[in-house]
Structure formats: structure tokens, C-alpha cells
Amino acid sequence: MTYGCRMLRRLVSRVYWACSRWRLVSEPAPDRPTVLVGAPHTSNWDFVLMLAIAWRLDVDVRWLGKKSLFAGWREPIMRALGGIPVDRSDAGRVVAEVVERVRAGEVFGLVVTPDGTRGAHQYWKSGFYRIAQEAGMPVTLGYVDRTTMTTGLGPTFELTGDVAADMDRIRAFYADKAGVRPHLRIEPRLRSEGTPDTPVD
């Protein structure tokens, strides 16, 4: 990305935050490739907030989108905003592409919204965890909280491979984060963990 483009993005983000009801409250942005978890994902406004956060903190972000979003005239726009098209018939290719980008020296946050389609699921999707482990990337916890009207980036940490312990840490962080639409919030829990009162086979 050119210096002029970065400056333009930062200017746009400063204007946005100056006019927005939301406040940006963030830990320092990671300085290495990371899987940036965006949660609770309860509204399409999350995408706008994600860009505003990334542009203000000068974080180069990538995000995954279904291939149909990149059709025709929309493709250059989506790619310019950091989009990576995903062919669901070859979803495994995503990890390989991320690894290739990391090895090529790119520094970016791969934004993943693991709580599915905003309230339609009981569990988080585990793709963010698999991508982070397979690509050797840490996880950064991004958040939106309607109760305090704050949003930003939380801690960045390495996954241990102990899924339950890692998810306990993630649950603790998001325990008081409500999302834009609190009634659509999903508890951070992977299907492989089961529910608190249901043992996992």
C-alpha cells in the first residue's frame, strides 16, 4: 500500500471517529501477521467499525468473503478493502494462501467473525482457531460493546493447542462485550467443547 493511500485512510478514519458516537479504545496494534477475531458479530455495521479501527491504527487487514461477493465490478472494490474470495468447494486453499502471504513478508490482520451468521448458531465456527494454528499466527481479539459504546482491539496472544483453556481465555475477554445488537450475541464456545452441562464424547 502506498504512503498516500495510508495517509488518506488515516484521515478518513479520524473524521469518522470525530463524528461517531462510538469510542475507539484499543491496545497497541500487533506488529506481525495475526488472526483478528471480530466479535460479537451482530450487525453489518461491524464491517464499517472494523475498517475504521484498522485505518485509524494503521493495520493492514484482510477478510474472507464468499466468491460471489467479488463478481463483476465489485471485485476491485472488495479487494481494495482487503477481501479474499473464498471458494467453498476448496475452502482448504484459504489457509495455504494465508501462509503464502505470511512467508512473502506481508504484515496484516486476517479478520474472522467466528460467531457465524449473527445469532443463527449456538456455537462459534472453529475456522479462526485452525487458521491461526496452521499458519502459525497469534490471535488478536477485536470487539464491539454497545453497553459502553466502545470498540477496538484487545490482547494478542498465541494459542496453546489446549482448546478449552484457549477458549476460556477468549470467553473471559468477551464476557462483558455485547455487540451492536446484544440480543444476537453468541457465547464464545466451539462445538468440540460441548456445552457447560453436556460432556464431550
Image (cartoon, rainbow, N blue to C red):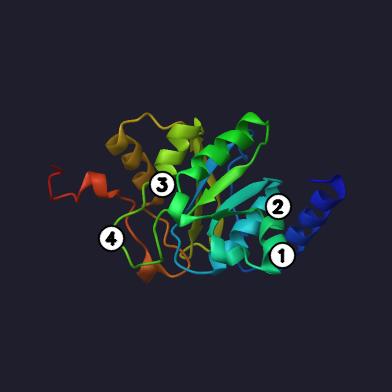
Q: Residue most toward the right? A: 4
Looking at the image, is mark 4 or mark 1 earlier in the sequence? 1
Q: Name the residue under label 4.
A: 122
Residue that numbered label 3 is attached to = 127
| SS category of the residue bearing label 1 | helix
Q: Please state which of the two labelled residues, at mark 3 or mark 4, is closer to the viewer.
A: 3
Numbered disc 4: secondary structure:
loop
Say which amino acid is labelled 4. Gln
Q: Is mark 2 on a helix, strand or loop?
A: helix
Foreground mark, 4 or 1, reads 4
Q: Which of 6 and 26 is in front in this view?
A: 6
User: From where the camera sits, is residue 22 visible?
Assistant: no
Q: First in sequence: mark 3 or mark 4?
A: 4
Q: Distance between the residues labelled 1 and 2?
A: 9 Å
| Label 1 environment density (alpha carbons within 10 Å; few <14, some 14–19, many ≥20) | some
Q: Quadrant of the C terminus?
A: top left
Q: How far apart are marks 3 and 2 (CA)?
A: 27 Å
Which residue is denoted by mark 2 in the rendering? 56
Residue at 53% x, 69% y: name it.
44
Observer-nearest of 32 and 16: 32
At x 68%, y 46%, the residue is 60
- Circle 3: element type: helix
Mark-to-mark CA distance, 3 and 4: 15 Å
N-terminal-most mark, 3 or 2: 2
